[in-house]
Image (cartoon, rainbow, N blue to C red):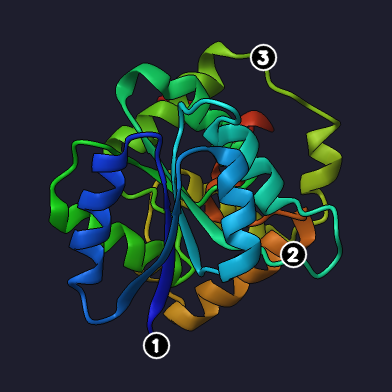
């Protein structure tokens, strides 16, 4: 199935370069682009993409606000694409907030072309882009230095079974589904089922939000 993508960046050359790279792939189709977050909302409503490749810093409406609006539509049933943020190291705080809002991950803007293509495929398939060690370091750093936004997290996590809590902890430690399955002696499909139930019970969009909640709730301690 073709992955429909829109590219959001305030630099026209960046949009054109990414579009040329992605359109060269047989399974990816760039269906639109936008120069700021406000335009992204309009293009999203018109083109219904599977994924939005979103820059963080833009005029008019930044990528964080656009991601929030895309992922929490006011109108029930509105199209909700997956969001992959584009960033640099100097906007780490923005990235963390984007992940909390439901973005599926982030990619450094100077990443190799192969990484961009792989990231689009990974996120479109429903996975969070959390494999790179830099992502885990970001989440650990903010979990360590920022006050946790606790709304009685223990009560929230109490809705999970012991096995689901165990799986959530392993997700937060950066393990893949395959690694979790091997460690717990489970089928990989069983792990996927547990993750689906965890997200549903906690009201989360994706794996990235689950990782952040695990740190903020104290289930996982940074540096352990």
Name above or below for residue 25 compared with residue 216: below
Counting residues from the start of the chain, the first of labels 2 and 1 encountered is: 1
Which residue is at a point 57% across and 46% down the rendered structure image? 39
Q: Which residue is mark 2?
A: 200
Counting residues from the start of the chain, the first of labels 2 and 3 encountered is: 3
Q: Which circle, 1 or 3, is nearer the viewer?
A: 1
Counting residues from the start of the chain, the first of labels 1 and 3 encountered is: 1
Q: Which residue is mark 3?
A: 147
Residue 31 seen in the current view: yes
Give coordinates of residue 141: x percent, y percent.
45, 20
Name above or below for residue 25 compared with residue 131: below
Q: Secondary structure at mark 2?
A: helix
Which residue is at a point 41% across and 21% down the rendered structure image? 91
In the drawing, does residue 95 fall left or right of residue 108?
right
Q: Are marks 2 and 3 in contact (CB under 8 Å)?
A: no
Which residue is at a point 63% across and 54% down the rendered structure image? 42
Give coordinates of residue 90: x percent, y percent.
35, 17
Q: Which residue is mark 1?
A: 1
User: Disc 2 versus disc 3: distance between alpha carbons?
Assistant: 25 Å
User: Disc 1 versus disc 3: distance between alpha carbons?
Assistant: 42 Å
Residue 220 seen in the current view: no
């Amino acid at each position: 199935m073709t992955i429909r993508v829109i590219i959001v960046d305030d630099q026209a050359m960046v949009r054109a370069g990414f579009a040329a790279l992605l359109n060269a792939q047989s399974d990816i189709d760039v269906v639109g682009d936008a120069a700021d977050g406000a335009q992204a909302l309009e293009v999203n409503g018109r083109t219904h993409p599977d994924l939005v490749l979103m820059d963080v810093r833009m005029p008019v409406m930044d990528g964080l606000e656009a991601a929030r609006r895309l992922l929490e539509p006011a109108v029930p049933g509105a199209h909700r694409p997956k969001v992959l943020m584009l960033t640099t190291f100097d906007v780490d705080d923005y990235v963390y907030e984007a992940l909390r809002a439901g973005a599926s991950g982030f990619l450094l803007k100077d990443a190799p072309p192969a990484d961009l293509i792989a990231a689009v495929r990974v996120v479109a398939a429903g996975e969070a882009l959390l494999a790179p060690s830099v992502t885990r370091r970001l989440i650990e750093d903010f979990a360590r230095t920022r006050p946790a936004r606790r709304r009685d997290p223990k009560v929230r996590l109490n809705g999970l079974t012991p096995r689901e809590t165990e799986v959530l902890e392993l997700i937060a430690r950066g393990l893949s589904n395959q690694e979790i399955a091997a460690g717990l002696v489970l089928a990989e499909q069983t792990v996927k089922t547990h993750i689906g139930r965890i997200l549903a019970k906690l009201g989360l969009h994706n794996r990235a939000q689950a990782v952040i909640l695990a740190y903020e709730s104290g289930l996982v301690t940074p540096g352990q």
